[in-house]
Image: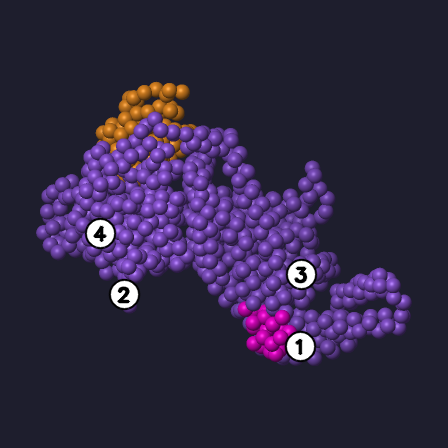
Amino acid sequence: MTTTVAQLKRGQKGIIKEFADGVLPVKLMEMGCLPGNEIELIQVAPLKDPIYINCNGTHIAIRRSVASLIELEIIEDSPL
Amino acid sequence: MSKQIKVALIGNPNTGKTSVFNQLTGLKQKVGNYPGITVEKKEGICKLPRGVKAHILDLPGTYSLNTTSLDESVVVELLLNKNDKDFPDVAVVISDVENLKRNLLLFTQIKDLKIPAILVINMADRMVRKGISLDIDLLEEKLNTKIALVSTRKGTGIDRVKELIADYKNLSVEPNINTTVIAPEYFDKLKSTFPNEDLYKLWLVITQDVNFMPIEKNPIEIPASFKTKSKSELKRLQQKETILRYQFINGILKQAYKVDLNAAKGLRATLDKILTHKVFGYLIFFVILLTIFQAIYDWSSYPMDFIDELFASGSEWIKNTLPPGGFTDLIAEGILAGIGGVVIFIPQIAFLFLFISLLEESGYMSRVVFLMDRLMRPFGLSGKSVVPLISGTACAIPAIMATRTIENWKERLITILVTPFTTCSARLPVYLIIIALVIPDGNFLGFSYKALTLMLLYLIGFGAAIFSAMILNKIMKIKTKTFFVMEMPNYKLPLLKNVAYTVLEKTKSFVIGAGKIILAISIILWFLGSNGYSDDFYNAETIVKQKIEKEGFTNFNVEAIRSSLNSYKETLHDSIARNGAIFDKEAIADSLKAKEIILRQKAVNQEIASYKLENSYMGIAGKAIAPIVHPLGYDWKIGIAVLTSFAAREVFVGTLATIYSVGSDEEDTIKNRMAAEIDPVTKKPLFNLASGISLLLFYAFAMQCMSTLAIVKRETNTWKWPAAQLVFMSLFAYIVALIAYQILK
């Protein structure tokens, strides 16, 4: 089973894996969501959607549907 | 005359681009629209060293030159079109020191278009606190540009920007990155097909509509013979390009940009924790909303009353000063009343934009969008629809303009279509007067019935918006593939200057934009109401005078004269008693008689005006629609008021005032006059619970605002949607009002 950003817990971090071309919106990549970059889940909105992430220093909100397209490798558990 | 340097300010959203613009141009700025679309175009003049002047154009914020929204496409269209009169001599790219990496993506794209580009690194005042150090010389060398380190908050670095602009001819136009490596074969083919065009520019033209449909024609026609790639292939290449650019940028920043990670993370995390909390987040949002409502309804009533009085007395003054005649009437009753009808909304609009710009500047608005997105989605709306729906309670016009930030077209369209259901401030005067008339006194759990009715009307409006959004979401077959991606900017203390400029600008654009329409309609209404073709109209004076001689005044006027005579008598007695003077019965009788003559004359004039109106073009139109409005419980007079309200709802009270010839717009007298109106058939008051509720519901749902229709047309670029709004909303209003009246009757 693959891990995606949608499965991160609050405070958890991961490194984006290589992803298939053309799946993610270009805008997301422009914001810095590129393979090899770190993503941290900062906050989850009520009803679990959208989620608020810090990707490579850029703070963005994305919907869960998009988040589940970004595969990653979890690097550390929440320090909290 | 010396030639002005044409400068374009370009940058990511939330980098303080507007602050730089304000500091460069001061008050010498002009806000307009790009032709055909409602993307704001801000221009200004800036004085440079050595007597040179620059024309500064503030382009909409964009993350890259790959367009995904209307705002962004404006930027790309301009940069790709060398023949555009605004094509810049030099581009000033604004970046934020904390997000330099992301900001540089756009910079390298502009550089690759071979446009001379200056890099402004803003928010330099945050560097120490955030532990950031920069090697400017190295950055300048690697990016092949000139850099200005600016803090708009502290006002430093702007002079350097001006120097660099004046000196733009010395900037290098060498591109940063060779994009062709992402698909060498493809670019070779492009080059042989278009030997005279710049390759990167061609690439942008080709990929422009991959994510977004441009409104204007591309500046370069691609011949059908040239086989381009499929959309998904192009998209893949765009991603490759993005990765290539980030590789280049990362390479540079590794050497020139250092962040001490131990520096304070602080405030942002704490604020986020509270403001997006699942309980406190909503609570805070609710309190802020309440404050905004309070400001719009309560605080703005003082300046509004003042404006109202000012125009009423101005109109009176003109009537008394200028020689009587058609021209004076036109100025006093048509034009001045029309301008007054626009100016009266300034306090509310200003308050609304004050709050919206405070919330946006501080970074809070993104948190609201974050909180609301999931809740709005089942209705086909986006978290970004919340701002328009809230703004709609003041006025649908700016609210519909505010939908521009929604990048998903379907969500944006639904938001535009349902926003007019929210209770705008123009409905308020109608609601207030009808509620005062038909809703009984008394209270429920300490809240008066009247206040509860008003609140219910707001809820009905909001409910109708949500409900129709849900239906539209089900029936509209628009496929969209744009994704919700929203930056969560850092919290900032709003810059007072920026807020003030925004309020000033938006208010000005409302007054000029919507004002023109309201003014035109007031003049037309005045004309229709004060002209006619029948003998009845021209001989109104004689007919009415004869009628009064024969039958006396109408019951209402008899009553009105008696009551005002009585109160006059009392004040006379009071003042005599206060001054200790002796009662002179004869003198009192004389002055009472004089007063009565004045009152009677006034009543005659009012009845003449009323009779004239009845036989004017407007009266004839009103009688023509009487059969249509009768099932709703309205007579022809209310019918006219409803009809004129299709121009703008707020004319309802004014129209009734004219029809009932109460002479002044003073609410209390109109109310009394309306209460005295008797249905000729049933012999009961015309404004009763049934007809009142029917009217309230009609105004809650009907699409009665020309300005809104005009703005919807502009935003959707077709008459289809505003026409649909007009027909469906008004039909729905009619049916609901009909049912309500027939049940309650």
Amino acid type of the residue tagged 4 in the rendering: Pro
Q: Do the residues at pointers 3 and 1 share their chain?
A: yes
Q: Which residues are magenta?
A: B317-335
- Badge 2 or badge 4: first in the primary sequence: 2
Front tag of 3 and 2: 2
Write down the residue under mark 4.
Answer: B116
Front tag of 1 and 2: 2
Amino acid type of the residue tagged 3 in the rendering: Glu
x, y percent for residue B325: 60, 78
- Badge 4 or badge 1: first in the primary sequence: 4
- Badge 4 or badge 3: first in the primary sequence: 4
* Mark 2 belongs to chain: B
Residue B157 can be seen, yes or no: yes
- Badge 1 or badge 2: first in the primary sequence: 2
Chain rendered purple: B
Q: Do the residues at pointers 3 and 2 share their chain?
A: yes
Write down the residue under mark 2.
Answer: B2
x, y percent for residue B560: 76, 64
Amino acid type of the residue tagged 1 in the rendering: Ala
Does dot 4 land on a helix, a strand or a loop?
Answer: loop
Chain rendered orange: A
Q: Is residue B140 left or right of residue B616?
A: left
Q: Are marks 4 and 1 in contact (CB under 8 Å)?
A: no
